[in-house]
């Protein structure tokens, strides 16, 4: 039995030490995952906290993760990200238009990077939810195909196909933004 | 820098650049981070308490060892009887253990009462007969006064007679142990009266005499049935020995109570055995012929059939040899009767049995008179008192 699974089973028995260990282990990764998709620290912290709050509620209902705790947390975080953008006004087109390739100063560089990041987030949001997850987990969280397949509950082959289509679509989106 | 070259190998440049722009992550506010962490732990405790009260006491060590966690006893009304029995104590003893002990005791007492009741109805050879005898001995040991001892022993002798009657009625042989025990108990009943003062002693002995008459009547009926259903396979030696004991004792008590010795046979005059052919005493007045003669006559003081028929009776060994020539001697019961005394006049008269009847084969039991060695002095002091008896 793996250490992660033992940790999860202890948490299911409401072992406070295990529950704390889970938070300290997975919260930073979930925060990074959310931040890279949202770009706001405060919101990312709030959504991270909300992810773990839902984890506790799921444990109470005995509906929490049975095996892959990290995958369950990433899916919850992804849903929160989707909900976050669903409730907010659609800024995709505006974000794509914000990028100014003509900046030259350092301050302009930072601003340009921020604009590029925002452009990238806007491009990601144009993908399907599953494609967004695959791209984020594969290229931002640096997870292997097998890990992503485990988290998303798919086969490695399907993750490869999703990845391929996502990258192609993302390329087209970014090329379209570059053309503007 | 792209970072993971392998994963990003083959990525279009614009995609690679866009993803690279997403890599930097702003550090979270540490205060908010710690606050969120603390809120998570508090929520975990709250939800754990609402879900499983025991979880608050769970430690990682107990979970790793997979040992069940025992909740602490809670005050108030327990939820279930099982929980009550498991968690509560009475005077330091777990309630469940105390309850088990009480139930076991009740079961033991209940079964004991049933066993005692069954033992009282048991017969020799029954597994419970030993318990019956021990209960009798225990009851006898509890008797503190001579009168109580006499009464208890007499009652127990009556039990032996009833046992013999039941055994004979069932067609079996009465064990010789029944007769032996009967002798001992009857002897004790009489012996205990020696310690009583004169009025009480006479009263007690009168009660014994009355009981003996009843027992003799009972045994007469038994012997009549035995004779009618004589079987070679049934041994009636014990019955004969009991009858002999009764007759001897009654004969000894009669003079002491101022009664003619012959009266001991009265009860059996009504029995069928008195009508037995060959009996020399078939009339209602037969018993009167057993009136003792003068001390020293030596023929037992009775006109026994044997005597009437000219059969010699050893004066010194007869039933009433205790009324022998030495009035200051050992007393009426001090002299053991000889073998001939087992076919003494009273039993042959009253039971009207043939001397050669197999019932009256020589008994292995000691003569009843031999059971009263200590009574000789007391009896000797009473020699000549009352009805001309040696007592």
Image: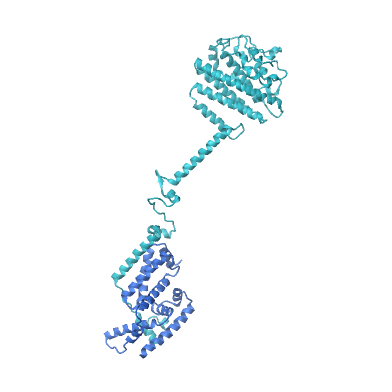
Chain colours: A blue, B cyan
Image quadrant of residue A53?
A: bottom left
Q: Is residue B221 above or below residue A62?
A: above
Q: Closer to the camera, A64 or B207?
A: B207
| Point 68% across, 26% down: residue | B225
Residue at x-position 55% and y-position 34%: B117
Q: Quadrant of residue B261?
A: top right
Q: Which quarter of the rendered picture does the C terminus of chain B lie within?
A: top right
Residue B35: % across, % down: 30, 68
| Residue at the limit of the structure toward the right, as seen here | B277
In the displayed structure, B4 sits above or below B184; it is: below
Figure disc tally? 0
* Left or right of B379 in this view: A160: left
Give the residue drawn at x 29%, y 84%.
Answer: A111
Q: Is residue B97 visible?
A: yes
Residue B53 point in image, percent of width and height: 39, 58
Q: Nearer the viewer, residue B61 or B144?
A: B144
User: Which x, y percent locates residue A86?
Assistant: 37, 78
Q: Please, is residue B358 above or below residue B131 in the view?
A: above
Whether residue B10 is visible, yes or no, is no
Residue B76 horizontal side relative to residue B216, left or right: left
- Rendered location of residue A165, percent (x, y): 45, 83
**Quarter-wise, where is residue B71 in the image?**
bottom left
């Amino acid at each position: 039995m793996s250490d992660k699974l033992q940790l999860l089973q202890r948490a299911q028995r409401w072992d406070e030490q295990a529950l704390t260990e889970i938070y300290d282990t997975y919260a930073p990764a979930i925060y990074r995952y959310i931040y890279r998709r949202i770009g706001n620290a405060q919101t990312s912290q709030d959504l991270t906290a909300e992810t773990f709050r839902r984890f506790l509620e799921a444990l109470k209902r005995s509906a929490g993760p049975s095996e892959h705790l990290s995958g369950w947390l990433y899916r919850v975080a992804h849903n929160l990200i989707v909900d976050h953008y669903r409730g907010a006004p659609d800024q995709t087109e505006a974000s794509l238009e914000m990028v100014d390739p003509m900046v030259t100063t350092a301050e302009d560089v930072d601003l340009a990077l921020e604009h590029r990041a925002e452009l990238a987030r806007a491009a990601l949001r144009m993908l399907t939810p599953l494609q967004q997850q695959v791209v984020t987990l594969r290229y931002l969280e640096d997870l292997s195909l097998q890990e992503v397949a485990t988290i998303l509950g798919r086969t490695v082959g399907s993750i490869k196909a999703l990845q391929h289509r996502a990258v192609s679509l993302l390329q087209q989106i970014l090329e379209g933004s570059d053309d503007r | 820098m792209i970072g993971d070259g392998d994963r990003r190998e083959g990525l279009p440049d614009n995609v690679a650049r866009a993803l690279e722009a997403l890599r930097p992550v702003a550090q979270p506010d540490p205060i908010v981070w710690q606050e969120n962490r603390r809120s998570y732990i508090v929520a975990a405790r709250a939800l754990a308490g609402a879900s499983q009260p025991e979880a608050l006491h769970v430690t990682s060590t107990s979970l790793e060892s997979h040992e069940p966690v025992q909740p602490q006893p809670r005050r108030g009304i327990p939820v279930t009887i099982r929980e009550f029995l498991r968690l509560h104590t009475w005077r330091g003893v777990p309630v469940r253990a105390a309850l088990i002990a009480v139930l076991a005791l009740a079961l033991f007492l209940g079964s004991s009462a049933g066993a005692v009741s069954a033992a009282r109805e048991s017969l020799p050879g029954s597994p419970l007969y030993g318990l019956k005898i021990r209960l009798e001995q225990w009851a006898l040991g509890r008797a503190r006064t001579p009168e109580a001892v006499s009464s208890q022993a007499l009652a127990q002798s009556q039990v032996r007679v009833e046992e013999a009657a039941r055994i004979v009625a069932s067609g079996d042989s009465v064990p010789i142990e029944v007769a032996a025990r009967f002798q001992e108990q009857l002897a004790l009943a009489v012996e205990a009266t020696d310690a009583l003062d004169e009025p009480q002693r006479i009263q007690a002995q009168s009660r014994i005499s009355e009981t003996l008459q009843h027992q003799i009547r009972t045994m007469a009926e038994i012997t009549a049935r035995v004779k009618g259903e004589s079987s070679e396979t049934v041994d009636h030696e014990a019955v004969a020995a009991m009858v002999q004991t009764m007759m001897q004792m009654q004969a000894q008590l009669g003079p002491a109570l101022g009664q003619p010795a012959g009266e001991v046979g009265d009860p059996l005059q009504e029995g069928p055995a008195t009508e037995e052919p060959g009996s020399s005493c078939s009339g209602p007045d037969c018993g009167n012929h057993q009136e003792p003669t003068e001390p020293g006559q030596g023929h037992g003081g009775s006109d026994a059939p044997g005597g009437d028929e000219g059969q010699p009776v050893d004066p010194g060994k007869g039933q009433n040899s205790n009324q022998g020539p030495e009035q200051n001697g050992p007393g009426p019961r001090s002299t053991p009767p000889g073998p001939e005394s087992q076919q003494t006049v009273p039993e042959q008269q009253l039971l009207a049995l043939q001397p050669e009847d197999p019932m009256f084969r020589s008994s292995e039991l000691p003569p009843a008179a031999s059971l009263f060695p200590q009574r000789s002095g007391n009896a000797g002091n009473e020699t000549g008192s009352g009805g001309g008896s040696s007592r």
